Image (spheres, rainbow, N blue to C red):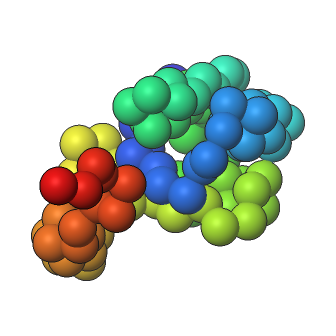
Amino acid sequence: MKKNVYKLSGIDCAACALKIEDGVNKLDGVFDSSMNFMLMKFFVNFDEDKITDEEIELGIHKSLSGVRIIGKNNEVFEDTYQEEKIFKKIPFFGRKRK
């Protein structure tokens, strides 16, 4: 048994997170999966003899269009880090004006 933790983005609601859980749980070789919506982390327990990491990642993408895997097992992908630095520079337009 192997466990992967994916950091995801592009999930807007708890119902979307449930779609990913349901889709991945249907894959042969997956024991269980769960989504922490607040942390945007997706946990998958699976049999590595029956299913590969790539098949699980494909299952995530097929379950919900627009979802992105931005990290896996505490590794954040480099292009995501650059993207987050850019977003931090964008001002928040919902603030109260003086």
Residue 41 horizontal side relative to residue 32, left or right: left
Vertically, is 9 above or below 87?
above
Q: Position of residue 91 (x, y in %)?
A: 23, 67
Residue at image coords 53%, 30%: 37
Residue shown at 45% from the left, 38% from the top: 40
Does 71 sit above or below residue 77?
Answer: above
- Where residue 84 sits in the image (x, y, percent)? 23, 66
Q: Is residue 90 above or below residue 49?
A: below
**Which quadrant holds residue 89?**
bottom left
Q: For this view, does 72 lie left or right of residue 46? A: left
Q: Nearer the viewer, residue 67 or 44?
A: 67
Give the residue displayed 67% in from the left and 22% down from the top: 32
- Between 72 and 38, the residue placed more toward the observer is 38
Q: Residue at x 66, y 53 (%)?
A: 60
Quadrant into which the C terminus falls: bottom left
Residue 24 seen in this snapshot: no
Residue 18, position in %: x, y?
A: 74, 32
Image quadrant in which you'd find residue 44: top right
Residue 68 is left or right of residue 87, and the answer is right
Q: Is residue 46 above or below residue 74?
A: above
* Residue 97 appears in the picture as rendered: yes
The one nearer the camera, 66 or 75, is 66
x and y percent of residue 39 in the render? Answer: 39, 31
Tag count: 0
